Image: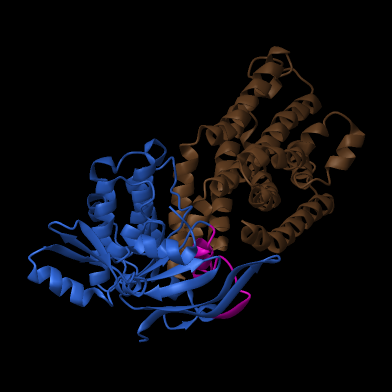
Chain colours: A brown, B blue
Amino acid sequence: MQANLRKLGALIAKDAVDLAKNPTMVLCVVLPVGFSVFYRFFMGDMGLGGPLRSGVGADLEPTVATLLQYIVLNMALCMCIGMGAATSLIYGLAEEKEKHTLRTLMLANVTAEQIMLAKGIVALGLTVVAEVLCFVVSGASWSLFGWFMLCGIVGAVPIILLSLVVGLASRDQMTAGMYSVPILVIALAPMFGNFSESVRNVVRFAPTGGVDELLRMAISGTVAPSELVMPLLVTAAWIVVAAVAFKLLYRRLLRDN
Amino acid sequence: MSAVALSMEAVSLSFGPKRVLDNLAFSVRRGEAFGFLGPSGAGKTTTIKLLTRQLTRDGGRINLLGRPIENATTADYERIGILSDTSALYERLSIADNLKLYARLRGTSRRRVPYLLERLGLADDGKRLIKNCSKGMRQRAALAAALVHEPELLFLDEPTSGLDPAARAEVHRMLAELRERGTTVFLTTHDMAEAEIVCQRVAILNDGVIAACDTPDDLKLRYARNRIVVRTRSRGTLELTKDAAGPVLSELAQAGELLSVHSDEPNLEEVFLELTGREF
């Protein structure tokens, strides 16, 4: 147990330092934060900012203000999960495979489980950092912070598991670029739900769709136990599906490489 | 404690229809440096992969540190160090940070890192990022990572490839010291001179079959040609068979003609070429 924790700690420290020194991964945090700033001020300049930008559009209807908060936070949530969790993991693992550092670690008596757990924890940490920064710059009400973080952390879990599988399936960073697209699309899917009701009715069943629904309810103040069932079920189902896929595939993918 | 560090008995492996290892059998004693030689594609790296559980054999038995490999525990693997043909370190971390990472993973003191850097000629480059290192520096750093926990059994797959002569000599000295301290070394190499310097015994692998296994000296004697070369004062250089040389040599000696007598033994490279059917 102690040896496991020691190895896990060493791997987490290594992954965190390696991530911080990787410009691509830094971009995974910068991009959602940048978009949050852009959305906030873009809508503010249109006179729609309302509570997002003090002094501008302060007389907005509460429903419009709520909608604007949702648009910014929905984008931030999806991008943090898509960029922070998915991209960092898929490219990170693909790079380890391409440069043979994954094999070298495993030959040093580090188990695949330890490597995957460390990578998952660091990806989750990166997502949380990105989410905190996005929330701070978004100008949203602090009363939503807890909900936003809860949705961001729970919603990242299935994407992290799926990204670990996709990362292991990628031979190198080139193939990772191709394989990461579907994961990125399903992570960002709730953003497209803003365009039409019918799209929203589909994307609510995406891995991040459940937590997005929860966020929408939290922002509009309509959280009720009966309304929580479906989003929680969707999220739980994706976590189970992703965990089963990970369990079934990761040993085989490791062996192939 | 078993006197044998590792052994293979009748081990075979196929990749599809191709038999890559056939009926392999050898053992390596504790504290011995054992060379596994063979041309490219002979199955050397595949053998190391079997011994380090990266591949699973089709048949036969493998024992590692006194127990069947399928029963080897995580604790057993903590006693093993591996430098594979693809061993690599993290490019965005420095040499020293990579070694500290492996020290922590292995549960050993970081205090060994400066010693290893010094021994492998990397003391002035400890802070250099791996991505800025030459191939030789990367190879030495990877070797240091394999040695960081002072393993009892060390697998080295072409450890000196890409190293300059001075660095190779230093690695050879280190391996000799490790062996003196009781470390078992399993080494694959193309370099016959290296095998002669480092290894007490060698096996020559050809097309997945062990063609010979013995000490370098005994192999050379076994494949020695039945010939001696005699330089004389006025009759030039004579080549004689060993069986018939006695009378001729005494005659030359009595006549004061004899300048030098050499037995014509092959070096390990020539034995290797003969056994593998290859040519210079």
Identity of the residue furthest to the right in this view: A198
Does A34 appear above or below A123? Answer: above
Where is residue A255, by image quadrant? bottom right
Along the line of sight, which residue is nearer the eye, A159 or B243?
B243
Left/right placement of residue A18 relative to residue B139 reads right
The residue depicted at 58 percent of the width and 73 percent of the height is: B22
Residue at 35%, 64% (x, y): give it. Answer: B268
Image coordinates of residue B55 in percent, x first then y, are 58, 67
Q: Is residue B26 left or right of residue B192?
A: right
From the top left corner, tell me how far across and down residue A12 is, in percent: 48, 52
Please say if A218 is above or below A71: below
Q: Nearer the viewer, residue A147 or B39?
A: B39
Is residue B188 at all visible to an observer of this figure? Answer: yes
Which one is nearer the viewer's eye here, B35 or A183? B35
Residue A254 x, y percent position in the rendering: 62, 59
Q: Is residue B43 magenta?
A: yes
Q: Quadrant of the N terminus of chain B?
A: bottom left
In this rendering, position of residue A98 left or right of residue A79: left
Q: Is residue A110 visible?
A: no
Q: Position of residue A41 (x, y in %)?
A: 65, 18
Decide: is A146 above or below B23.
above
What residue range appears in magenta? B41-62
- Give left or right: position of B55 versus A162: left
In magenta stretch: residue B242: no
The outermost residue toward the bottom is B1
**Quadrant in which residue A66 is drawn:** top right
